[in-house]
Image: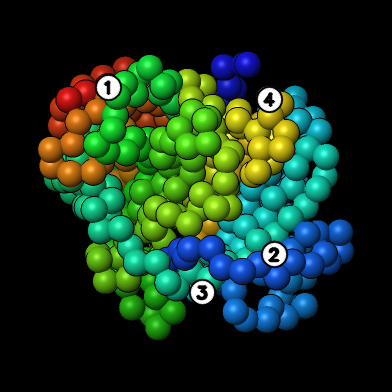
Amino acid sequence: MKSNFLKLTPILFSIVLFSSLIAPTSPVAIAASTTDGVSISNETDQKIQDSKLAEILDTSRKIASEYKKNNLRSLNVSETKQVIDYYRIENETGYFYETTPDNKESLVIIDLNDTPLDKNIAESTSVAAAISSIPSGIGGRAVISKNGSYLNATVTTATASQMGSTKSGIGWIYSGFNGTGKRSNGTNYSMGTDMGLQYSNAYGYVKWTPYVLLNDGGKEIFGDPLRGYDKLQYKNGFVGGTDVNFTVYKNVNNNTRLSLIGFGVCADMECNNTEDTYLTSIIEVAGTNINTVSTWKVLATVAGSENVTGKNYARFSNINLDGNAVTPVVDAQDYATVSVSGNNATINVSR
């Protein structure tokens, strides 16, 4: 298993998506079909028009193609060693597209209305950006107080041994920003985002799975920690103890995006193929229209309660804003140590 990962050059895309809100659901009966060589599973109670499916597939394929080409240029990784996952959040519907190393394509459509936001997780992430401790959890945070279009870094994730016996909480490694955006009616609003990885040892695999939370002051949720994401990502995720390159984009054609690139546990979401594979996971929430960022952040936390116990570790390397190296400032050490050296930050969490 390889462990070193090269720094990637983020790419901005010119693909127009539409406004969206999110809140995931539990699985329902699946109606499956195959269109244009793609296995399509519609888990909603609504009929998706053929024109809409064509639009979603066209967007998904374009984004997957761009990332495959970027990975080939930056890492010399052939398409036969890559799996691309693209999760598009639009209105009350989520579209999860995957293309595997053997070019099998699938699209899962889910209804995002039925599952309420996990308030405990929301407190321990977005709210924590404004204070010196980590509510409903423990952890460390470093910040960059600048505007910018995207934050990029490579994070070395914790291994199972570094996580220790974390049983009363959940380990998180993430980035994000606090900023302002403009609604479709022209009014401004404040947005806090948490975008990164959640620790999991489910299904017998130690891995870090993607998550996104976008919180509009508690009034309106554009995203959440993707509690339904496990049925989409399923058994797959990023291998613990390896490097994951991440980029947080504040605005790509009015959408907020997280991209994660690293070694996947499997070559598909059901882990039918367990060969070493480069996994690229892209999560995009449409219609956020963020125009200004006041603060970017990097964190490692253990969330669950004020009395949570556990461990976590993360090393953020080559932190850059719009391609320029930036030095973060230590902002919170709640049962954690945050060490900054140039544009690198190491966070150790333990209680």
Residue 336: image location, x then y, percent: 20, 25
Q: Secondary structure at mark 3?
A: loop
Q: Read off the residue under disc 2.
A: 41
Asked whether residue 332 appears in the rendered view, the answer is no
Gap in angstroms between the C-alphas marked 2 and 1: 41 Å
Q: Which of pointers 4 and 2 indicates the residue nearer the eye?
A: 2
Query: Which amino acid type is shown beneath numbered disc 4?
Result: Asp
Q: Earlier in the sequence, mark 4 or mark 2?
A: 2
258 or 151: nearer the viewer: 258
Provide the residue designation for mark 1.
Answer: 348
Q: Is residue 101 above or below residue 230?
A: above
Asked if the residue at tag 3 contacts the one at tag 1, i.e. Cβ–Cβ closer than 8 Å, the answer is no
Disc ID at residue 91: 3
Mark 4–mark 2 Cα distance, whole angstroms, equals 27 Å
Task: Determine the residue positioned at 28% across, 51% down.
Answer: 121
Tag 4 residue: 276
Label 3, residues with CA under 10 Å away: few <14, some 14-19, many ≥20: some
**6 relative to 285 in the view: left or right:** right
Q: On residue 23, which mark appears?
A: none
Q: CB of mark 2 within 8 Å of CB of mark 3?
A: no
Q: x, y percentage for residue 58?
A: 76, 63
Among numbered discs 3 and 4, the one appearing first in the sequence = 3
